[in-house]
Amino acid sequence: MSTRKRFIATGDMVLVAMFAALMAIGANLTSFLVIGSVPITLQTLFSILAGALLGSRLGALAMTVYLFVGLAGFPVFAQFRGGLSTLLSPNFGFLLSYLLVAFVTGLIIEKSRTKALRTFLIACFTGLVINYVFGTHYMYYAFQFLAGLEAISYQLAWAWMAAPFVKDTILTIFAAILSRRMYGVIRKRA
């Protein structure tokens, strides 16, 4: 057993901060587009990239930093929102899912022996599925139990996700290709 303490290197801290900032930018770059209650953002793309490029631990840390900055009140969430009231928002499930998306995406790539495009596609699409399943289920239950909107059916919650799904599918393919190309460069520095 090693007695060496693990510290985060300065370069890693910079990358964590950069991905937290990219999440804030991606949340509001296109968030004026809203379908149902779901803003169309680039957050899924950046959470997948964080996991794929930084790895499971640092990718999840970047998403944690982003989440805590927003919950502290800074307007970094979609539609320039922030604060503890976000906890009661139907979209909070998507925000929580970004931690898991980054962690699982990074973990799949880390555990894979080959770092081929196929590995990155599997990892990135696994992250996308986690985002949609976790976020959409939370949104549905938030409408049902927090807001008391029983008219919002389970099918309607998933139907709202159809338009962002097309965009996110295309961006997930882009994320897999981009992260595969950049992976070696990021890892050489580590």
Image (tube, helix red, strand yellow):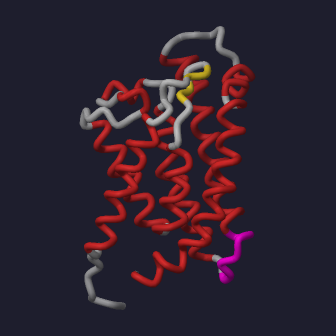
| Residue 11 image offset from top left, x and y in percent | 31, 73
Residue drawn at x 31%, y 57% as measured from the top left: 17
Residues 122 and 133: in front is: 122
Q: Is residue 30 above or below residue 5?
A: above
| Residue 98 image offset from top left, x and y in percent | 50, 48
> Is 135 on the left or on the right of 160, as rendered?
left
Q: Is residue 118 magenta?
A: yes
Residue drawn at x 32%, y 51% as measured from the top left: 65
- In the picture, the quarter occupied by the N terminus is bottom left
> Is 94 on the left or on the right of 150, as rendered?
left
Residues 117 and 85: in front is: 117
Residue drawn at x 59%, y 44% as measured from the top left: 131
| Residue 83 image offset from top left, x and y in percent | 29, 30
Q: Is residue 186 magenta?
A: no
Tell me the magenta residue range: 113-119
- In the picture, the quarter occupied by the C terminus is bottom left
Q: Is residue 176 above or below residue 12?
A: above
Residue drawn at x 58%, y 17% as measured from the top left: 144
Q: Is residue 1 above or below residue 147?
A: below
Tell me the quarter of the picture where residue 3 sits.
bottom left
